[in-house]
Amino acid sequence: MNPARVLGYAVTMTDDPPAEDHSSDPEKSPLRSVHTNTFPQLLEQMGASVLVTTYQAGKLVILRNDCGVLNTHFRNFMKPMGLAVEGGKLAVGCQVDIWEFHNVPAVTAKLGELDEYKDSSFQHDACFLPRRSHTTGDMQIHEMAWVDNELVFVNTAFSCLAKRSDINSFEPCWRPGFVEKLVPGDNCHLNGLAVRDGRVRYVTALGATDTPGGWRDNKRNGGILIDVDSGDIVAKGLSMPHSPRWYRNQLWLLESGEGTMGRVDLATGRYEPMVQLPGFTRGLSFFGPLAFVGLSQVRESAIFSGIPLVDRLEERTCGVWVVNIESGQTVAFCRFEEGVQEIFAVELLVGVRFPDLVNHDADLIGRSYVLGDDALGQVPDELRS
């Protein structure tokens, strides 16, 4: 059933070129999407944009309102997964490293010099430039969050939470009590984290197992939610849970194997689904009464076979769905038609309507200097941007 038709939305086709070719010729674009007209309208009302990672396609996708049309903008990364946003900082977790970008507003005036924007009327209000890259090795990095100005991330290969290190690949800072040793075996598929009261408080895993890949034997309903402070398993019997979030004094969760979003009653450990969506739910961000949920088609493979979603839906959807958490109704969506099948992270950039991220143009990066106030005072006025 077409949800756009059911909800009476108008649907607009957009042709999304790869990052290296921003031609408007649809024949040159393998990345296509459709969206409800309500999606860009919501971004306009919110004064926001959306970041999405797709490790399968190797892209960071920026969803932006462009005069009532959803502009889908792509930048290339090596298997990007986790995202963390705080103020003007953005971290992107990739296959073997973590990239940190900072917003440098002065550079927005220079974006018009890039070939992809020479014939456009885009008015950028943010530009994220690379500031730091930390090599971690292949630790299957999943969700990330800024906590007390430090980046905490899920190290799935080693079944732990970790931080960056000036010397080492990573510094482990917590792991489940049932994981005895620090070994790169993806023993429980630790994947999601939720920050509450300024610290990481809850994590999700696909099994309470301590053997390499042990979670795969009961992936259908072996998922758990863990309280980091106590180490207790708060909820169990979940189908591939992801993306726990503490929002409005409630713990939200995506039960990906069922394709649902819902809440966990911390007193009873009961998961209460609010809405069932047409894809593997993974990636969650909130604004007011709205939840932005990532959906993946999931591949026909041993990993995803046998889960309830695959049994329920022969054809699954990839995109970003917007759900009103007060009514449970879908109010907008962006669906990827070609080129993107799996989404990992969804993050809102509130207060930033039309951002860009530059990781592909060495000349622009090379000519963009960020200096402290003291050093800037020593630069002649005519050289300042």
Image (tube, rainbow, N blue to C red):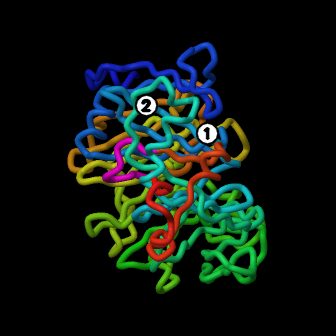
Q: Is residue 60 visible?
A: yes
What amino acid is labelled 1 in the image?
Val
The answer to whether residue 3 is above or below residue 275 is above
Q: Position of residue 344 (x, y in %)?
A: 56, 49
Secondary element under disc 2, as helix, strand or loop, is strand
Q: Which residue is mark 1?
A: 298
What amino acid is labelled 2 in the image?
Asn
**Quarter of the picture holding the N terminus:** top left
Give the number of marks: 2
Q: Nearer the viewer, residue 89 or 5?
A: 89
Q: Counting other residues with Cα less than 10 Å from the Cα at mark 1, is it few (<14), some (14-19), or many (20 or more)? A: many
The answer to whether residue 4 is above or below residue 62 is above
The answer to whether residue 79 is above or below residue 336 is below
Q: Residue at x 42, y 58 (%)?
A: 253
Q: Does label 1 or label 2 sit earlier along the sequence?
A: 2
Q: Position of residue 170 (x, y in %)?
A: 70, 76
Q: Counting other residues with Cα less than 10 Å from the Cα at mark 2, is it few (<14), some (14-19), or many (20 or more)? A: many
Magenta stretch encompasses residue 106: no
Q: Position of residue 173 (x, y in %)?
A: 61, 83
Q: CA distance from mark 1 to mark 2?
A: 25 Å
Q: Residue at x 34, y 24 (%)?
A: 4
Q: Which mark is residue 71?
A: 2
Span shown in magenta: 347-355
Secondary element under disc 1, as helix, strand or loop, is loop
Q: Position of residue 350 (x, y in %)?
A: 33, 53
Q: Residue at x 50, y 66 (%)?
A: 379
- Residue 3 as seen in the image, left or right of residue 358: left
Q: Residue at x 55, y 73 (%)?
A: 152
